[in-house]
Image: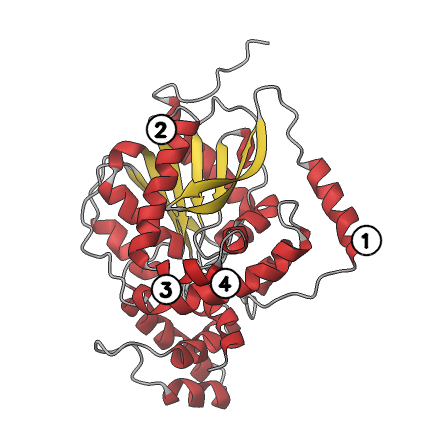
Amino acid sequence: MRKESWGVVVALLLGGLQAEAQEAPATQDRAEAVRIIADLRKIVAPEGLERSEKVRIGGIDQWVSVRSRDLRNPVLLVLHGGPGWVAMPTSWYVAHGWDEFFTVIQWDQRGAGKTYAANDSAAVTPTLTVERMHADTEEVVRWARKTFGKEKLFVLGHSWGSILGLNLAAKHPEWLHAYIGAGQAIDARESERRGWAWTMEQARAAKNEEAIRDLESIAPYAVGKTPLSVKDIMLQRRWLNFYGGAAYRRPNAGFEAGAVALSPEYTEEDQRQVWKAESVSVEKLLPAILTTDLSQVKQLKTPVLLFLGRHDRNVSAPVAAEWFAGIKAPSKQLVWFEQSAHEMLAEEPGKVLLSLVRQARPFAERVGDVAPVSSK
């Protein structure tokens, strides 16, 4: 397939977004809009921090942004989806208000976003493996704990990032107040099978002959151990997205991609690079991700929260919920997002913030890892 076609695969696997390069607005218009957004969200609190920087992770420069109204609050590290679909440039909308309760770290993973642009792609691309991404995740957590003087932090993994996050929680529970999985991936092939079956059901109910024909052409889908082809995944996701399996009552989840164009953290050149980076990340990581099966994780030694979209068929919410029912942990809670599919962070951002504050932050409060309440 053509290399440029890889750019949509993030939408087709775990990210759930129609990640197509958006035509940038006129420079003057964008500059003014970004200035306004940056000024609106400017952190002026004396105990706060607003910073975007490169840190040395896994032998290369990797970009992080840090936002906090009070550095005495608990750290929340966000592991973005994709692979390659960065959360930093959309966080001005999706994560609005989080920095009032947490020190929020957004990280552009190896081969993604600003991190891709900061390095020699020819040298870094061969290192894009699932194993290396797990190692990078551990190193980022070590950096965060040391930099902010925290014994524990929160990790929120979305989609592909939830694979990284759950693996971290299983290996290093001592590092976490709690693990938060959003659009949690568990058994990728089972998720694919159920997504295909649901999509076919919608197509038949609508008597959509084109969709039925396309879906039948890839049957049996995700059966056995034969690796799925990107072509088949793209075809399945075309119709799954069309029927709202990625974004509730929307034909695709591309609406979130528009936020990239207005990101204060991203220059226009960063925007152009993000789509190229995404293609590289998907091409290198997709085959391995399709073999993921975390259903053998039966017990965690850290509290676990799941944020699941009721209508998520892109990364099957029922598969995640079934796994969650059997998991043993010191504390566990499942939060359903009734007006969301896979992109609950963007579809119901208010409920996400409330859930983080009400369900997650108390774990840090109990051990004093929060800013003191003002007596004024």
Q: Which residue is mark 4?
A: 278
The residue positioned farthest toward the right in the image shown: 28
Q: Is the residue under label 4 in contact with that under label 1 (CB below 8 Å)?
A: no
Mark 1 or 2: the one toward you = 1
Q: Earlier in the sequence, mark 1 or mark 2?
A: 1
Question: Which-is-in-front pick, marks 4 and 2?
Answer: 4
Residue identifier under label 1: 28
**Rendered image: mark on residue 96:** none
Q: Are marks 3 and 1 in contact (CB under 8 Å)?
A: no
Task: Please name the residue that numbered disc 2 is placed on.
Answer: 363
**Circle 3 sits on which residue?**
285
Query: Nearer the N terminus, badge 3 or badge 1?
Result: 1
Amino acid residing under circle 4: Glu
- Asked which secondary structure carries label 1, the reply is helix
User: Which residue occupies 43% across, 28% down?
Assistant: 147
Query: Whole-Å distance between the Cαs marked 1 and 4?
Result: 27 Å
Residue 127 visible in image: yes
In the picture as drawn, the residue positioned furthest to the top comes out as 375
Q: Where is residue 223 drawn, in percent x and y? A: 25, 78
- Compared to residue 173, the image places residue 260 above or below, namely below
Q: CA distance from mark 1 to mark 2?
A: 45 Å
